[in-house]
Image (cartoon, rainbow, N blue to C red):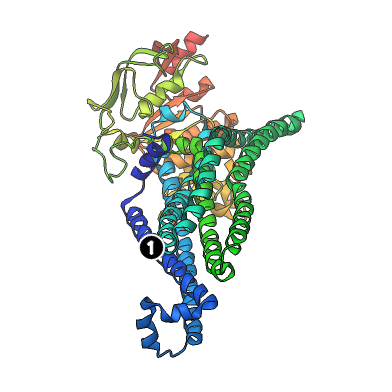
């Protein structure tokens, strides 16, 4: 199977049923449009004949029913009705093609939107291990750029190619019926040239396609890195370095796009020139025959009309095929994102319910990120009772954050298993386990919205419980700061919370966790950005929460763990010891 056919079959599987039905309707419209073209071309020959030889048209056997119906009595009267018919046929063909263009364009963009949304949805449902293993710029480029390119480089060209193919067949049939020699000269002469050009430029278009796919991702990457590290760039004065990286990627991208555009459009001008030469040569040949002048006008008119219809359609077909070839690499990247598997619970409102009433257990739990990398955690056994406060300490790289990712269910153990109340956490019940957990990382992500929207993160605006937002802010020791701002809880935080201090961002993250009202709160060095007094106040507020709330803490300062019921020391992926806070102080001393 041809690679393009294979790609299109993969793409068709991702078109939903509603869109497929619309494409079927569009095909019917394409067929109807081709009939309109046949009528338009078919009305040309009697019109041209009426201009040059009205008597022959008036006496033609096929024209007699038409003449009797209109009550025509002389050859001169034939021209007016044939002129009206020819004009009406041309207007009908134009109107149908305009309607076809409107519907196909709207349908292409609607289908492109469906695909982009589906890519984003599938990406968000991918396991955490997938997200940390790939470059974000590749995903963003796939969703925003390459998925959009599917519209321009695949869907629209395919519809144009299909429409052009049906039109070509219809026009060819009409021309063969009226004058086979004109049909052969017009179709096969021009068609062979387009086939030859397509074959000669194939390799260059594939090469351009690969450049477009690679450099569009590099452009997104350079933008992310440049804007994401703007503080360091300003301090270091390294703007030129990032501009050079962007310039190199963007220039190659534009050159490849321009090359494809030229290859798609250039044959048109050659064909127009050859068409004029062909008409001139044919005219010269026919005028040398007896009664050549009277004979040449209908033939030349028909040839001119055929060329006027055939050449744009052939050019459209060629340009569409060239565009499809030029967008193959980007289409493959888009299809890979569309083929991402969805978890079984993606379309379910509820997953298998998982209760947490007694304890969380780690049983011989080991983990490595890939099969070729060493173990990060090795055969851990640990019981965490409901309502306990557990602290985790250890050197950088000892596996603390990875362990909490496993407890949250973001990562799956390589060996061993995680249990909640004696029931294993699996793919079937993992979504239910997520509902028990709130996570406060060291670097809080804040959307470019209001304080209220960031505390109730992920909740539709109309469903936000404003009283719970205020209560959560008070518990996180940030309510007083918010209430003195002019807009209060409607204050915009800026992109990634840039208008807030580090301590304010952390406390909003803690308020977000409290708003969720989860059973388990994970604090991954969440108070490291706070000063000692604020940290003490926040931890005091957390310690005063319900005794049913289980809190797991990775702390930068040992003093943060003073109210923990036990502290787990990790070393090289193993539990070195478990102790109380006083025992930890004695060991440290």
**Residue 539 seen in the current view:** yes
Which residue is tagged 1? 29
SS category of the residue bearing label 1: helix
The mark tally for this picture is 1
Could you say which quadrant of the image residue 522 lies in?
A: top left
579 vs 487, nearest the viewer:
487
In the figure, 390 relative to 329: above or below?
above
142 and 553: which one is in front? 142
Q: From the top left corner, tell me how far across and down residue 581 is, in percent.
A: 44, 18
Q: Quadrant of the rendered structure where residue 383 is?
A: top left
Side of 384 relative to 101 (left or right): left
Q: Nearer the viewer, residue 218 or 8?
A: 8
Looking at the rendering, in which quadrant would you find the N terminus?
A: top left
- Point out residue 252 in the picture as x, y percentages from the top left corner: 65, 34
Q: Is residue 287 left or right of residue 559?
A: right
Vertical comparison of 63 with 161: above or below: below
Rendered location of residue 26, percent (x, y):
38, 59
> Is disc 1 surrounded by few (<14), some (14 to 19) or many (20+) residues within 10 Å?
some
Query: Looking at the image, which residue is at 56% across and 39% down?
Result: 505
Q: Residue, x 45% and y 10% (percent of image)?
A: 571
Q: Is residue 410 left or right of residue 442?
A: left
Picture coordinates of residue 132, whole percent (x, y): 47, 27
Single out the residue that lies furthest toward the front: 290
Q: Nearer the viewer, residue 515 or 197?
A: 197
Residue 152 in sight from this viewpoint: no
């Amino acid at each position: 199977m041809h690679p393009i056919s294979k790609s299109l079959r993969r793409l068709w599987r991702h078109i939903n049923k509603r869109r497929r039905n619309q494409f079927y309707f569009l095909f019917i419209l394409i067929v109807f449009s081709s009939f309109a073209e046949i009528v338009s071309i078919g009305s040309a020959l009697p019109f041209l004949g009426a201009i040059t030889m009205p008597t022959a048209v008036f006496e033609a056997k096929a024209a007699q029913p038409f003449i009797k119906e209109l009550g025509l009595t002389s050859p001169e009267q034939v021209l007016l009705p044939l002129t009206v018919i020819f004009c009406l046929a041309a207007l009908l063909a134009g109107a149908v093609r305009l309607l076809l263009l409107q519907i196909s364009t709207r349908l292409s963009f609607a289908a492109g939107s469906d695909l982009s949304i589906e890519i984003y949805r599938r990406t968000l449902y991918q396991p955490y291990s997938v997200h940390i293993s790939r470059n974000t710029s590749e995903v963003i480029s796939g969703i925003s750029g390459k998925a959009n390119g599917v519209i321009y480089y695949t869907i629209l060209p395919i519809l144009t190619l299909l429409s052009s193919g049906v039109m070509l067949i219809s026009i060819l049939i009409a021309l063969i019926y009226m004058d086979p020699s004109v049909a052969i000269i017009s179709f096969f002469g021009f068609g062979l040239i387009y086939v030859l050009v397509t074959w000669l430029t194939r390799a260059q278009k594939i090469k351009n396609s690969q450049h477009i796919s690679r450099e569009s991702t590099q452009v997104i990457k350079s933008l992310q890195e440049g804007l994401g590290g703007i503080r360091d760039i300003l301090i270091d004065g390294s703007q030129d370095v990032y501009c050079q990286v962007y310039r190199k990627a963007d220039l190659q991208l534009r050159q490849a796009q321009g090359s494809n555009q030229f290859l798609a459009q250039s044959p048109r001008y050659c064909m127009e020139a050859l068409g004029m030469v062909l008409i001139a040569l044919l005219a010269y040949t026919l005028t040398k025959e007896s009664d050549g002048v009277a004979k040449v006008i209908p033939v030349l008119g028909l040839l001119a009309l055929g060329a006027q219809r055939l050449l744009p359609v052939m050019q459209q077909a060629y340009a569409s095929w060239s565009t499809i070839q030029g967008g193959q690499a980007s289409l493959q990247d888009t299809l890979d994102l569309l083929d991402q598997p969805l978890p079984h619970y993606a379309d379910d409102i509820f997953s298998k319910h998982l209760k947490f009433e007694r304890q969380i257990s780690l049983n011989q739990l080991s983990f490595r990120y890939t099969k070729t990398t060493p173990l990060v955690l090795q055969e851990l056994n640990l019981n965490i009772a409901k309502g306990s406060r557990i602290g985790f300490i250890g050197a950088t790289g000892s596996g603390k954050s990875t362990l909490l990712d496993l407890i949250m269910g973001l990562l799956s153990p390589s060996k061993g298993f995680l249990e909640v109340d004696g029931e294993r956490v699996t793919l079937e019940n993992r979504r239910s386990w997520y509902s028990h957990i709130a996570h406060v990382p060291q670097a809080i992500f804040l959307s470019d919205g209001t304080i209220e929207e960031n505390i109730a993160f992920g909740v539709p605006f109309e469903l936000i419980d404003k009283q719970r937002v205020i209560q959560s802010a008070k518990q996180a020791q940030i309510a007083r700061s918010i209430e003195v701002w002019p807009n209060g809880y409607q204050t915009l935080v800026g992109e990634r919370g840039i208008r807030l201090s580090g301590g304010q961002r952390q406390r909003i993250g803690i308020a977000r966790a409290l708003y969720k009202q989860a059973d388990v709160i994970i604090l991954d060095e969440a108070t490291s950005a706070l000063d000692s007094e604020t940290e003490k106040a926040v931890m005091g507020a957390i310690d005063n929460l319900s005794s049913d709330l289980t809190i797991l803490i990775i702390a930068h300062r040992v003093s943060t763990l003073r109210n923990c019921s036990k502290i787990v020391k990790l070393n090289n992926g193993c539990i070195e010891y478990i102790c109380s806070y006083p025992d930890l102080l004695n060991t440290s001393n």
